[in-house]
Image (spheres, rainbow, N blue to C red):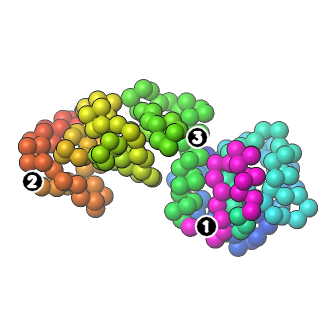
Amino acid sequence: MDKPILKCVIVDDSTLQRLSIVKLIENHPSLDLVAEYNNAIEAKMGLATTDIDLIFLDIEMPILSGFDLLDDLTKKPQIIFVTGKTKYAFKAFDYDAIDYLRKPISKERFLNAVHKAITNYKLKNDDGFDDEDFIFVKSNLKKRKVFLNELRYIEALGDYVKLVTEHDALVVLSTMKAFEALLPEDRFLRIHKSYIVNLDKVERYNSKVIELDNQQLPLSRNRKSDLVEALSASMKS
């Protein structure tokens, strides 16, 4: 399923910082840069006539701060704050910020923040997902929505299981058997007492291990035939 394309703008009075964010946005397939502004006053005028999904917003700017800009907007898009100071972090989340990135921005932090924005967009817009495309799990006392096409594998950790996705890892209180029952059996397979794998992510395998994006997971001897059969079935479907 195609990812949504989020229309976004940059608001930052630093030319160098805008250029660095522009480069990151242009290299991301799910972002469409609509405009960039070097102050909040220009941004306020532009946003009055343009529908935007996401703002990369600096806080300390002349005349009008990033917070002032948001206070003046009647329709607020998703917000990723980008600033050189940590002192505004607590206040930033009063504005329901998706993330708070400190300059200079690393590519990894940028990608994680954008992933949150995309997931939030899907949740708010019910972007064409049906019941088989995601599951809800409880991690760190919060319910999280996990999209199955992003779930790489599940690992047993005693009384818990670890869900490894394309972007992060979640630890959930569950047995492997209970969690296995939540997953569609045509897409996921128990390959070892401690591992369940997404069949779509399997790149190579032999009699002892499987490979997922250069990462190796153990394959039980009595599970190899199940893996061959499952992969064959998934290729035909």
Range of the magenta residues? 87-106
The stretch drawn in magenta includes residue 93: yes
Q: Which residue is mark 2?
A: 207
Q: Which residue is mark 1?
A: 105
Residue located 75% across and 59% down the image:
88
Q: CA distance from mark 1 to mark 3?
A: 21 Å
Above or below 24: residue 156: above
Residue located 53% across and 33% down the image:
127
Q: Residues within 10 Å of mark 2 (few under 14, many from 20)?
A: few
Q: Which residue is mark 3?
A: 120
User: In this view, which residue lies farthest toward the right?
Assistant: 63
User: In this view, which residue lies farthest toward the front?
Assistant: 159
Q: Residues within 10 Å of mark 1 (few under 14, many from 20)?
A: some
The stretch drawn in magenta includes residue 142: no
Query: What secondary structure is found at the residue carrying circle 2?
Result: loop
Q: CA distance from mark 3 to mark 2?
A: 40 Å
Q: CA distance from mark 2 to mark 1?
A: 43 Å
Residue 224 on image: x %, y %: 11, 45
User: In this view, which residue lies farthest toward the top?
Assistant: 131
Residue 68 on image: x %, y %: 86, 52
Q: Nearer the viewer, residue 125 or 172?
A: 172
Q: Earlier in the sequence, mark 1 or mark 3?
A: 1
Q: Amino acid at mark 1?
A: Ile
Q: Earlier in the sequence, mark 2 or mark 1?
A: 1
Question: In the displayed structure, does residue 90 sit left or right of residue 234?
Answer: right
Query: What secondary structure is found at the residue carrying circle 3?
Result: helix
* Callout 1 touching callout 3 (CB < 8 Å): no
Above or below 144: residue 33: below
Residue located 74% across and 46% down the image:
94
